[in-house]
Amino acid sequence: MADRRLQVFHAVARHGSFTRAAETLYMTQPAVTFQIKQLEEQFNTRLLDRGHGRVTLTPAGEIVFAYAERILGLSDEMETRIAELTDELTGVLTIGTSQTIAGYWLPMLLDAFIKKHPRVVPRVFVANSENIENRVAAHELDVGLVEKQSDDPTLECTLACQDELKVIVRQGHELASATSLKATDLQGFPFVDRDPGAAIRALAEDFFRRNGVAPETLNRRGELGSLPSILHLVKQGFGFAIVANAALNDYNNRGLVGISLEPRLFSSLNVLVPKDRFRARLHSTFAEFAVNMFSNMQVKPQAPAEVTGLTQSGVADS
């Protein structure tokens, strides 16, 4: 409903980049440049300064940006209020999710949600949990599904369920017959780790540190942002990895052995939304749907000592 030129200008100003704005709006960079040029011609003044790899606002641009925020916010609120009168959810829903959730949890969630709300169009962005958390806080994503609890005061973080983290090795590996593994048992063995910013990496590093093994002394053979790549390398005997148990339930991952850590370690599946004064009903409905579905899909394990910020009932500390 709002002027497309204002939407594009707002995105460029917020990101300080034509490229980032184009990615966020799913437009080409020339199309973004054209929209900005039209807006500047309408006001007969330059709104953006381009230089040194960064886009900044001119004094006129500062004024337009302030009004654009108010206009776009009111436009979104109006469309949502009108849509609520029809009692039917519609529109694009941007979702950010971690690798594990995208591969093993999200398909079931989207299938169930779209069957109930067929006019909703999900747009999914996959990255590590830290990246997703930052993009939800920046209002670049409507909802985040991550494997870490957030302490960002601008976000509402709801625990949905937990999943055990396990050491995985290929069948026949020296560790494959173990019933459980301590941090010290893993020293010296080649380790295929997640990328910095991944929630599972942070949990694993904390586990090693608290159990007498400095993470920097581990025999890291690789750091990958792709969970399928990690699983493939482990199958090839490249080393061990630490992954969520959900990954082991996949038929394609036969040939891998999952071993519990001692003490056991759990990740948490959390739903993030911004703490806004006004939130679209679509965003709130999806977030609540995700929490309820994930909570019903899995019984929470009783091993709270290894889950940061959780009580024995599996509910986040208040």
Image: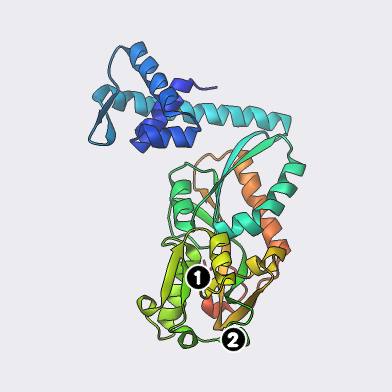
Q: Position of residue 52 (x, y in %)?
A: 22, 35
Q: Position of residue 139 (x, y in %)?
A: 47, 42
In this rendering, the answer to whether 72 lies above or below 166 is above
Residue ID at (38%, 21%): 36
The answer to which of 144 and 193 lies nearer the viewer is: 193
Say above or below: 277 vs 298. above
**Foreground residue among 33 and 288:** 33
Q: Secondary structure at mark 1?
A: loop
Q: Residue furthest front?
A: 236
The residue that mark 1 highlights is 309
The residue labelled by disc 2 is 180
Q: Residues within 10 Å of mark 2 (few under 14, many from 20)?
A: some
- Quadrant housing residue 266: bottom right
Residue at position x 66%, y 71% from top? Answer: 300
The vertical placement of 239 against 93, above or below, is below
Residue 283 placement: quadrant:
top right
Q: Amino acid at mark 1?
A: Gly
Quadrant where the N terminus sits is top right
User: Which residue corresponds to the image point at 37% horizontal and 36% vertical from the top-left?
Assistant: 14
Q: Is 306 on the left or on the right of 20, as rendered? A: right
Residue 83 falls left or right of residue 65: right
Q: For the residue labelled by badge 2, is the local secondary structure a helix, a strand or a loop? A: strand
The mark that comes first in sequence, 1 or 2, is: 2
Is residue 233 among what the camera can see? yes
